[in-house]
Each structure stands twice: as C-alpha cells, then as structure tokens.
C-alpha cells in the first residue's frame, strides 16, 4: 500500500541555484512518514509521552533531478521491510511522472535511552 | 559591553535570489545570543534540566541590505534593558562596516509551564 | 479579505522544549503569504525571471503562546496597507481560537539590484 | 588528508527529543565540505557566476548515536574517490572520540543545465 503526500516548494526550501537544498528532501519525506504513521492510527506525541520514539538509523538517498521553487511535488512512501524493532521505507519524490529523489530509510523504535523496543502492531499493518 | 560572533553564510542559508532567507537571520542572532549567554557562565542545558528556559517574546527586525552566499558576517549583541523576568537585546548583523540586519529582541525567563521567573544574576552582568 | 492557510507542525519545526522554534514562525507565515499571492494570480517564479522580487523589509513579531509538535495551525493573513512599492500584512497563527503568534510584515517590491518598483495591481486587489 | 571542522549544536538544530534532527547532519557536513573546498582554493561563488556548481548526487548515511543540544562536534572529511566529473567523500561527525554520524557523499560537478563537467584540478588535490 503506497502512501502519497503533496509538498509545495517554498522560498525556505531552495538554494541559490533555485533548486531544493539537498537536506530539505529529508524534511519532505519525514513529513510524509509522519502523515502515513498518523493515518495508520499511531500517535507519535502520545508515544513520546510514554517514552517511545521512532529514530532514523540509516538513509540511502539518490538525487535524480532537481525540484524547483514553486513545484508541486508528491512523496510516495511504501513499507518495504519490518523486523522486531525496525522497519524500512522506500520513499520517492515525484514532480508529475518524474522521480526527482529516491530514498531507502531505516527506522528503529526505541526508548529514550536508545534501547530498541518491539514495534507497535500498527506499523506492520501499514504494509 | 558588546558581544561579537562570526557567522559564515552557507548554501543552507540562502534562497534562490542568492541572499539569506529572511527567517535565517533569526537563527544567526540566536547563535550569537547562545554564545553570549555561555560566555557569561550561564549553562542553558543545565537550566533546562532544572525546568527553566529563555523564550523569545518579541522581535522587531529591520532588513537593511541583503547578506549573500559565502559572506563573512559578524553579529553584534548588546543588552539594552533588564527587568524582573525579562531582558532586551539589540542585535545587528554586519558585513564589514555595513549593517545588514538589525533586531530588538525581548526574552523572558520562565518555567516549563510558561510562568515568568526571576532572571539569573548573570544576565544583568552581561550589560 | 482574510486569507487562511493550514500548517501542520512536524519534527523539523520544534526545538528541545517541544515547541516551535522561534524562527520557524517566519517560515510558516511566508508559506501563507506565498499561497495568498498565488491565489491572487501573481506568479512569483515568472516575476523572478523578469527580475522582480518581493523582499521583506521589516517584521514586528509577538510570541503569545507556544505551538507544539503535531499541532494543526492556521495562518490568517490580511493586507493592511499598500503604498507605491510597499505593502504591509497582518499575520496571525492560530491553534483553534487561540492566537499563538502575531506579526506585522512590511514587504517591498524591487528589482534584483534592490531598487523599489511599482507594485503589480494584483497586490492591492488582495485587500 | 583529513579535513576537520567544528560545529556547535544550537537550538535550531535539535528536535523535541533534545537531539539533532536527522536532516540537520546534512547541513553540518555541507558546511564542512564548503570549508574544505574553500581551503583548497576553490571559490564556489565564482564558479557559480561561471555557470558551474557542485551537486550532491548520492548520500549514504548512518546515524550511530545522537548529538545533543550544546554539543561541540567535529566533522571529519576525506576525499575517497575522484573520477572525471564526480568525487566521493567520507564524512564523520564526532563528539570527542565517539562517531555519531557517518556518511558517504557523491558529488558531481556540472553546468546549470545539469550536464557533468570535468572537475577543477583543485578537487583531486584535496585527496
């Protein structure tokens, strides 16, 4: 099941070449993950209160073509792998049919001391 | 006593006009305030542990001339007013002799519920 | 005529106090201004190609109450003053009925050398 | 030859867990690359005027341990591979002896239309 989330490119996002600054794609795809997690019924704020957080442990990112100021983008996110305390997501940023950015993101569920914890069942249900 | 702190302008800071994005001056001057506070012997991380934070309550900012990519800037900060739980700082961002940005910033010292608290004595000593 | 634009607070927006970092409100209200300008039929990307940009010249900002992670905010924007090359906007960030942040923003229309230029007529029509 | 560049963690860098937001490590390591490139005698602003830019084409990043507010970090950067229009850098963010973040970054030198161009000789000399 692929989740789709729209992103508009604003002044804050681009650099002097008029293209999206490379770190900002990570902001874009994190928004999409947050929305996918919310749609799955997971309340990150409540988890945080309970001493549990999702933390990114690895990112592999390919910059395929630049996104530009004022572009209307879509982030597609798919769950690709779930193990005990970890899951992986494939995320692609599109402008229309064109893939601009692609990332494989590994996330670990843990307590505030960084100890891995068993994933909430809603995570696997996103697949 | 005026505090001076250097800032280099990087790719992350500029927009597609090649000039510093307007919100980023607030990041620059906050770095300068943090360094001034540190130099005064105030440990913000320890205060935070003790349930005390500095919060900005008002900013008046004038954008006088644009800072550009790769510019070598200096932030000048002076304490201009101290009352019970609040203080004000005048902050100016310079490139050489040219003032590019000027702000008057009001900061309140408070607990984590937002209740104002008496300032640590080190704050007044920064004046 | 008041323009309204929704903003969701993500991880990228908050600081270690769990509240929106003070500079990020300027990002939020700039998104709202960009959307208002777009809705008025002004194409900032095309203006930029033609050597014209909107630049912020002054901000007066009051931080009334903190926005928190995961908050669903609305930015209300109203045009309050238009002169030859400048206009002012009153912008307020709300969570429900509660005003969290309020700013008066002055914007100047200019060429790439910073010379003020007569505003496009669509600007006054936003009022 | 390893390049070292210090980074202080400010309020703008951390999220509500009190740790550096994952995208911000990419800002940190880009500052270090910019300083390494400057130290090698390459003027990115002049290159940009001449229609040449460095663009990141791939990042592999591992988040090993969190950096926290007020941390004093060092970014170590080493050139690991140079081909016609591309080079790779290994970058590690340390707090003291502890590696917190590690990335392998591939950069391509190109014109403003995205066509790869032969690297300036100063790049290989950084190795």
Image (tube, coloured by chain):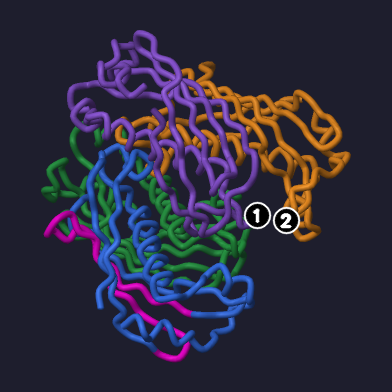
Chain colours: A orange, B blue, C green, D purple
Q: Is residue D113 visible?
A: yes
Q: Are marks 2 and 1 in contact (CB under 8 Å)?
A: yes
Q: Chain of mark 2?
A: A
Q: Position of residue D11 (x, y in %)?
A: 49, 59
Mark sitting on residue A45: 2
The mark lying in front, picked from 2 and 1, is: 2
* Picture residue at 45% right of the left edge, 37% below the top: D29
Instruction: List the residue tagged with mark 1.
Output: C70
Q: Residues within 10 Å of mark 1 (few under 14, many from 20)?
A: many
Marks 2 and 1 sit apart, C-alpha to C-alpha, by: 7 Å
Residue C115: x percent and y percent?
11, 48
Residue B60 vs residue B54: left or right? left
Label 1 sits on a secondary structure element that is: loop
Residue drawn where x is 64% and y is 44% of the image: D65
Queried whether the magenta region covers residue B48, the answer comes back as no
Q: Which residues are drawn in magenta?
A: B83-108
Q: Is residue C8 visible?
A: no
Residues tagged by mark 2 and mark 1 found on one chain of the structure = no
Where residue B14 sits: x, y (%)? 32, 43
Q: Position of residue C19 (x, y in %)?
A: 58, 63
Position of residue C94 in the picture relative to residue A77 (left or right) = left
As displayed, is residue C72 above or below residue A73? Answer: below
């Amino acid at each position: 099941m692929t989740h789709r989330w729209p992103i508009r490119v604003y002044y804050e996002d681009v650099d002097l070449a008029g293209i999206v600054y490379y770190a900002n794609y990570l902001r874009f795809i994190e928004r999409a993950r947050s929305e996918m997690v919310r749609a799955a019924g997971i309340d990150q704020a409540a988890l945080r209160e309970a001493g549990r957080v999702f933390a990114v442990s690895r990112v592999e990112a390919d910059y395929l073509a630049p996104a530009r100021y004022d572009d209307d983008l879509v982030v597609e996110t798919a769950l690709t792998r779930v193990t005990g305390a970890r899951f992986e997501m494939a995320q692609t940023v599109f402008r229309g049919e064109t893939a601009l950015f692609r990332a494989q993101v590994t996330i670990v569920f843990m307590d505030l001391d960084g100890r891995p914890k068993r994933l909430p069942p809603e995570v696997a249900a996103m697949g």
